[in-house]
Image (spheres, rainbow, N blue to C red):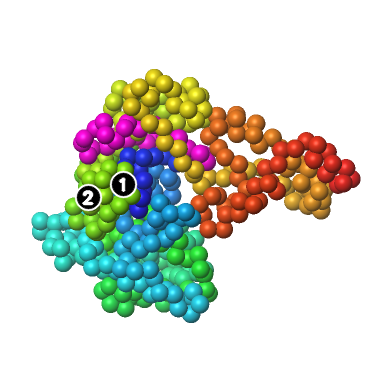
């Protein structure tokens, strides 16, 4: 599932803690392509460079495309090209990456591109748009919460940040952009390169996050940053057709979205349907989870999210209640990447200098009871890397999460 899952097949909108279940109508029960969903938190911005909260990032993922994406059907999760014709070419041991854009990328029609929304040639995504999008993250006047993605990594980016911090905001706002930085190199309209201060094999993962969604420099220059945050123009799977802040956002299928299919779709007919599968998504801001649940039961929402407070009442833990099954409601669960943990304070000399003591405390911590109190909406974490991610070590599970009071007592004696 190469787009955000909640956008493609009506899956989870909100990522909850660890094992997050949700309920949804059987896909065959509704023939239409309009999906009604709800978010419990405010969408603070529609600008990807400013999307520091989950609800805003989800919205940015619908409106803006990224250079890379995850193939969610593979384990471990793998990066793959999205806006790129192929995976980037790594040079200098990972200190430089060279990119080639696809030739079927277009921003959605908008007056910023000319009369009647602009021609396709005027709306084509170019290398200069990519570099412009990345520089916005490093513009000190933007106050982007994700400047850390580039800081100290991209050649010249810290100097760019300092220059924009001192630049006048009103006159010749984009002068520093026109000068550019050594780390973001435009080669031609479809080819560009990123040069890092040192090799970084993890850098490419940044290019699959909605923060780094590509925006059209022509639209940003036309509207300015403040207006662009309320009037987004992107090349993502949907465009914003209606928006009432804190109430409702309506997303409509982008017919010009790059050609991509989902061969693993449950419905065989959908495997030959160009993504996105939905024609329209109506996202309502509903702060009270009980209100959203009641609307779901009334058929007003296709998806409802369970949380630790109502999971037992609705699903009896991980089993869907019979009354809901009779209504052809399905329970869908998946493991999220959120890690909750209890840490040791190494400022305490007793803990910092005594491994056996720390092991004893670990064995005395009742993880099964903690999960039960969370209504079974969690799984034990064997370290900071969750299942499905490269680097996960399942053999650590026996060495950790070992609730064993007898072993804890033994370790305490050995710890003195």
Q: Residue at x 76, y 46 (%)?
A: 359
* Location of residue 135 with respect to 336 vertically, above or below: below
Left or right relative to 262: residue 182: right
Q: Position of residue 373 (x, y in %)?
A: 60, 29
The residue identified by callout 2 is 273
Report crowding for label 1: few under 14, some 14 to 19, many 20 or more residues within 10 A (C-alpha).
some
Q: Residue at x 51, y 68 (%)?
A: 201
| SS class, disc 2 | loop
Foreground pick, 217 / 284: 284
Q: Using residue 268 as the reference point, say whether residue 54 is left or right of it.
A: right
Q: Which residue is mark 1?
A: 265
The one nearer the camera, 139 or 130, is 130
Residue 202 percent across, percent down from the top left: 50, 65
Q: Give yes or no for residue 22 being in the magenta stretch.
A: yes
Q: Nearer the viewer, residue 259 or 198?
A: 259
Label 2 environment density (alpha carbons within 10 Å; few <14, some 14–19, many ≥20): some
Question: Is residue 71 inside the magenta stretch?
Answer: no
The residue positioned 50% from the left and 24% from the top of the image is 316
| Residue under the image location 41 percent in, 24 percent down | 290
Quarter residue 364 falls in: top right
Circles 2, 1 touching at the beta carbon (< 8 Å): yes
Of the numbered discs 2 and 1, the one sitting upstream in the chain is: 1
Q: In this image, 296 relative to 95: left or right?
A: left
Q: Seen from this angle, which residue lies furthest front?
A: 268
For the residues labelled 2 and 1, the Cα–Cα distance comes to 10 Å
| x and y percentages locating residue 23 in the rendered image | 39, 31
The quadrant where residue 80 appears:
bottom left
Which region is colored magenta? Answer: 16-45
Q: Quick check: can you spot residue 270?
A: yes
């Amino acid at each position: 599932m190469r787009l955000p899952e909640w956008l493609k097949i009506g899956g989870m909108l909100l990522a909850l803690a660890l094992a997050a279940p949700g309920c949804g109508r059987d896909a065959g029960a509704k023939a239409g392509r309009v999906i009604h969903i709800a978010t419990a938190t405010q969408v603070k911005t529609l600008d990807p460079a400013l999307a520091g909260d989950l609800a805003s990032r989800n919205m940015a993922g619908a409106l803006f495309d990224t250079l890379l994406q995850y193939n969610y059907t593979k384990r471990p999760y793998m990066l793959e090209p999205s806006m790129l014709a192929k995976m980037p070419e790594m040079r200098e041991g990972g200190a430089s990456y060279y990119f080639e854009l696809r030739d079927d990328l277009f921003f959605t029609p908008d007056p910023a591109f000319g009369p009647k929304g602009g021609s396709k040639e005027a709306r084509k995504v170019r290398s200069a748009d990519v570099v412009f999008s990345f520089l916005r993250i490093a513009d000190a006047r933007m106050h982007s919460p994700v400047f850390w993605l580039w800081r100290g990594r991209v050649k010249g980016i810290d100097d760019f940040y300092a220059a924009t911090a001192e630049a006048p905001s009103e006159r010749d706002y984009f002068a520093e952009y026109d000068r550019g930085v050594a780390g973001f190199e435009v080669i031609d309209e479809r080819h560009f390169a990123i040069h890092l201060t040192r090799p970084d094999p993890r850098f490419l993962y940044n290019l699959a996050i909605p923060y780094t969604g590509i925006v059209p420099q022509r639209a940003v220059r036309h509207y300015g940053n403040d207006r662009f945050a309320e009037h987004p123009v992107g090349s993502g799977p949907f465009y914003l057709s209606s928006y009432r802040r804190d109430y409702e956002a309506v997303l409509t299928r982008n017919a010009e979205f790059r050609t991509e299919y989902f061969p693993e779709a449950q419905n065989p007919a959908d495997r030959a349907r160009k993504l996105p599968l939905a024609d329209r998504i109506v996202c309502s801001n509903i702060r009270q989870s009980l209100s959203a649940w009641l609307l779901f039961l009334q058929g007003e929402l296709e998806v409802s999210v369970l949380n630790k407070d109502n999971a037992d009442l609705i699903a009896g833990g991980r089993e869907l209640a019979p009354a809901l099954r009779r209504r052809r409601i399905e329970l869908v669960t998946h493991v999220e990447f959120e890690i909750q943990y209890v840490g040791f304070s190494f400022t305490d000399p007793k803990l910092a200098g005594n491994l056996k003591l720390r092991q004893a405390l670990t064995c005395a911590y009742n993880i099964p009871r903690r999960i039960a109190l969370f209504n079974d909406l969690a799984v034990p974490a064997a370290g900071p890397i969750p299942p499905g991610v490269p680097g996960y070590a399942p053999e650590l599970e026996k060495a950790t999460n070992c609730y064993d009071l007898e072993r804890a007592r033994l370790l305490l004696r050995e710890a003195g």
